[in-house]
């Protein structure tokens, strides 16, 4: 992901125009790697997120909602102590490095004006966020690094702030085109990587564009391409876009060497929020739900093994009548059976051709006991078939239920995971923890979407929400949707006669929040809520329905996002 110095420059420029000066009203730390500032500027509220996540390190304005812990971490409390109510005066980038300094003015306990720096170092898994006072001393950091882990510098409360080691690269706006050409060895090849190692803030993703603009031409062509690149930076000619390659990428400069589809955004912050939003939340949910997913997967495998065993039993039970036949033939020919014999050959009266058949015997049993043995086997298999047939149906339902829960985890938010845990406790899969005081039951929170014509669409993303939506919230004439024969969410259109466009948009939502999220031409059934019933004794979220019609849609994440109602 090319969150390079150029992207950083564009974000800093936008933040200076948007949130400076701005008052820090609230400070939250949703996870151990994320910090959220609520800022009031120009009569508007903004949310600024910092993340030092090893994969999704970033900073930008966001519209996402976060679940905050009941007890804030120590770093969050330190920031609240020193920065609450403070004014962000300026935001600076160190050259083209991905080191950003937020200058924040506030008053101390004595009422004196004090300046702090919130320094963010965007360096992938080595990213840091720290609060530094006027003396250059670290008051606290999101991640502590002792001397034993880093000889160059210590990142601990009380230590002096030392900048990251310099890479001794050139600032792309402070060199001439001639200096740029001198740094390139045209005989060595891989010119885009030479540019990366020469210029500060340039990623391989961006360097390929400079090479593409030069069309592998002469030195003069590369000089012109570099001058064009410089002018874009100086004049802030940005086109923030996400490029839909096999692996999605983004950048703020227009990249002409990529022919794939792209989504263009008005600002760099909007682009970053769109790119990271789902990914970062999925990673948070994945971490919180890892044990839950493993538990459900193991339960599913256990039931699949049980189903195979039952299927083998059914196949054996199909031979029950053969055992009855052998018992009857043996009874009819007891006079031919010798005591201690291992087999006997008799005429098969059931065969039109009266062929002979050999019956295996147990030498330890008498002739009549051997006959009874075959009758007992017949009765045992006959009875087992009835029981196992019921067990197979029950096991299949269990597997379907577990598959549904695994699918719900795939599309769950952090709040949804808590609902799934609670459901598993209620169903007896997980032992309920003993609490001193009973927790007051809260109504499930449903996700809301708004169709193009303004019609409200409600979505349940787990079984608790599905049951609450379908059986409590929805009206009898509302339209209910669900993917056909595919685990997924219940979706309700709050209208008795929605337009065809609204039905298709709701069907897209139903397909997106299902196991077929990444498929095309997904069948989605829809009917009135009055035709949706829950069978007695059924698992949570399971319903039957009739009088449905079916539409086919291909889920599109961008469309779903635009329909989302905050």
Image (tube, rainbow, N blue to C red):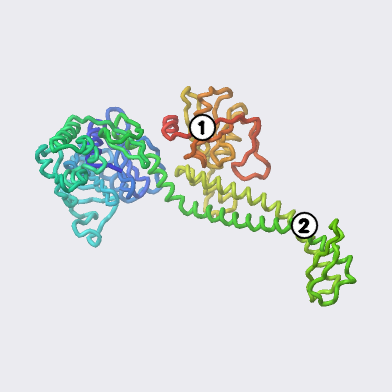
- Above/below status of 179 relative to 456: below
- Please state which of residues 411 and 382 is positioned toward the viewer in this rendering: 382
Image quarter of residue 270: top left
Residue at disc 1, secondary structure? strand
Label drawn at residue 382: 2
Residue 281 is left or right of residue 394, and the answer is left
Label drawn at residue 296: none
Residue 28 percent location from the top left of the image = 34, 43
Image quarter of residue 87: top left
Label drawn at residue 553: 1
- Between disc 2 and disc 1, whose residue precedes? 2
Q: Residue at x 40, y 47 (%)?
A: 283
- Please state which of residues 224 and 343 is positioned toward the viewer in this rendering: 343
Residue 461 is left or right of residue 164, and the answer is right
For disc 2, the neighbor class at 10 Å (few under 14, some 14 to 19, many from 20) is some
Residue 564 percent location from the top left of the image = 44, 32
Q: Residue at x 15, y 37 (%)?
A: 218
Q: Is residue 421 visible?
A: yes
Quadrant of image for the N terminus: top left
For disc 1, the neighbor class at 10 Å (few under 14, some 14 to 19, many from 20) is many
Quadrant of image for the C terminus: top left
- Circle 2/circle 1 CB separation < 8 Å: no
Report, in whole angstroms, how far the alpha carbon at label 2 lies from the one at label 1.
Answer: 47 Å
Q: Residue at x 59, y 53 (%)?
A: 428
Q: Residue at x 79, y 59 (%)?
A: 322
Residue 297 percent location from the top left of the image = 53, 53
- Count of numbered tags: 2
- Please state which of residues 99 and 364 is positioned toward the viewer in this rendering: 364
Q: Is residue 114 visible?
A: no
Residue 124 percent location from the top left of the image = 28, 48
Residue at disc 2, secondary structure? helix
């Amino acid at each position: 992901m090319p969150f390079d110095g150029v992207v950083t420059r564009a974000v800093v420029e936008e933040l200076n125009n948007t949130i400076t000066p701005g008052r820090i009203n609230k400070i939250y730390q949703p996870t151990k790697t994320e910090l959220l500032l609520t800022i009031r500027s120009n009569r508007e509220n903004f949310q600024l997120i910092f993340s030092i996540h090893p994969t999704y390190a970033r900073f930008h304005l966001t519209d996402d909602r976060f679940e905050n812990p009941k007890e804030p971490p120590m770093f969050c409390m330190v920031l609240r102590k020193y920065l609450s109510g403070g004014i962000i005066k300026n935001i600076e980038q160190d050259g083209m490095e991905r080191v950003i300094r937020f200058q924040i003015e506030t008053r101390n306990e004595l009422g004196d004006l004090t300046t702090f720096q919130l320094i963010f170092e965007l360096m992938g898994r080595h990213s840091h966020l720290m609060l530094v006072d006027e003396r250059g001393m670290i008051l606290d950091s999101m991640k502590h690094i002792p001397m034993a882990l880093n000889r160059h510098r210590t990142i601990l409360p009380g230590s002096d702030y030392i900048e990251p080691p310099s890479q001794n690269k050139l600032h792309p706006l402070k060199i001439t085109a001639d200096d740029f050409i001198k740094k390139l060895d045209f005989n060595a090849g891989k010119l885009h990587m030479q540019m990366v190692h020469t210029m500060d803030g340039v990623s391989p993703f961006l360097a390929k564009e400079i090479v593409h603009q030069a069309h592998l031409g002469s030195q003069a062509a590369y000089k012109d391409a570099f001058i064009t690149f410089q002018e874009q930076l100086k004049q802030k000619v940005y086109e923030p876009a996400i490029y839909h390659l096999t692996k999605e990428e983004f950048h703020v400069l227009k990249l002409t060497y990529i022919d794939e589809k792209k989504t263009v955004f008005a600002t760099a912050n909007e682009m970053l929020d769109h790119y990271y939003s789902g990914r970062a939340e999925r990673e948070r949910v994945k971490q919180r739900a890892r044990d839950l997913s493993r538990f459900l997967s193991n339960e599913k495998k256990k039931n699949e093994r049980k189903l195979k065993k039952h299927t083998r039993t059914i196949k054996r039970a199909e031979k029950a009548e053969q055992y009855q036949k052998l018992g009857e033939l043996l009874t009819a020919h007891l006079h031919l059976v010798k005591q201690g014999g291992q087999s006997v050959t008799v005429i098969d009266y059931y065969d039109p051709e009266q062929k002979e058949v050999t019956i295996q015997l147990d030498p330890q049993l008498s002739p009549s006991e051997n006959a009874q043995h075959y009758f007992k086997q017949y009765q045992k298999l006959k009875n087992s078939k009835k029981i196992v047939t019921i067990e197979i149906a029950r096991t299949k339902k269990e597997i379907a239920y577990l598959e549904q829960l695994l699918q719900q985890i795939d599309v769950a938010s952090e709040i949804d995971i808590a609902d799934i845990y609670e459901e598993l406790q209620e169903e007896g899969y997980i032992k309920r923890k003993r609490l001193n005081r009973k927790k007051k039951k809260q109504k499930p929170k449903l996700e809301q979407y708004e169709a193009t014509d303004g019609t409200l669409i409600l979505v349940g993303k787990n079984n608790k929400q599905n049951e609450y939506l379908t059986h409590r919230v929805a009206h009898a004439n509302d339209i209910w949707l669900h993917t056909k024969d595919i685990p997924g969410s219940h979706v309700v259109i709050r209208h008795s006669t929605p337009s065809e466009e609204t039905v298709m948009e709701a069907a897209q939502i139903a397909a997106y929040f299902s196991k077929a999220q990444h498929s095309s031409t997904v069948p989605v059934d829809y009917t009135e809520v009055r035709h949706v019933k829950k069978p007695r004794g059924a698992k949570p979220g399971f319903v039957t329905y009739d009088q449905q019609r079916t539409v086919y849609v291909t889920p599109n994440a961008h469309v779903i996002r635009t329909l989302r109602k905050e």
